[in-house]
Image (spheres, rainbow, N blue to C red):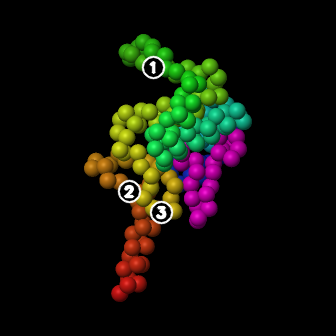
Amino acid sequence: MPAAPDPRPLTGEPLALDLLNTRWNKEGVVQDLLTDVEGLAVWLDANGLDGRFDADATTLRHTLQARDALKKAVDGSLTEGAGAVDAVLTHGRIRATLTADGPGELPEFGDPSWGPAWLAARSYLELLSTASDRIRGCAHDACILHFFDTSRNGTRRWCSMAACGNRAKASRHYARTKES
């Protein structure tokens, strides 16, 4: 059975940030996609992991542990989050392999229910090694979404210009017109 449609306002970010974005604000109320295994199925499907991992209670518990660990590292500090992210990473490893295309890497898990959590934590390490300064939280006060800034000059501020960016511009305009 196909997963339900993804209700989140921002999708398509790297796996680590996409996992963080399973919580978002909607009209001032925090929404959480991962309250049950059905939400986990939606997230797995959105990230192409639905055929590889089961959407069950154990996988959900491990995925939530990874989300909490990533939140500590991204919204807190690397020092605060390192131990929590490392605790997730202990449940998998990379095996070097040779493929028809050349050298490759194959993730391995002692327990497959750790797979999505481990892949998200590994994704965060890759983002840190690529451009740690491009991992951002939306600049809108009420938004809790995260994104990887791929803009040319690295100055993206909003999760979405159409949503949060437009709200911020409208608020500034309203404040200016109210003053005059």
Q: How far apart are the two marked residues, 1 and 2, measured between alpha carbons?
A: 34 Å
Viewer-closest of 37 and 126 = 126
Q: Left or right: 61 with respect to 26? A: right
Residue at left offset 49%, top offset 20%: 94
Range drawn in magenta: 13-41
Badge 3 crowding class, 10 Å Cα cut-off, few under 14, some 14 to 19, many 20 or more, is few
- Disc 1, SS: strand
Q: Quadrant of residue 27?
A: bottom right
x and y, in percent, of residue 139 in the image: 42, 59
The residue identified by callout 3 is 141
Badge 2 crowding class, 10 Å Cα cut-off, few under 14, some 14 to 19, many 20 or more, is some
Residue 2 visible? no
Badge 1 crowding class, 10 Å Cα cut-off, few under 14, some 14 to 19, many 20 or more, is few
- Name the residue type under label 1: Glu
The residue identified by callout 1 is 105
For discs 1 and 2, the disc positioned in front in the rendered view: 2
x and y, in percent, of residue 39 in the image: 66, 44
- The count of marks equals 3
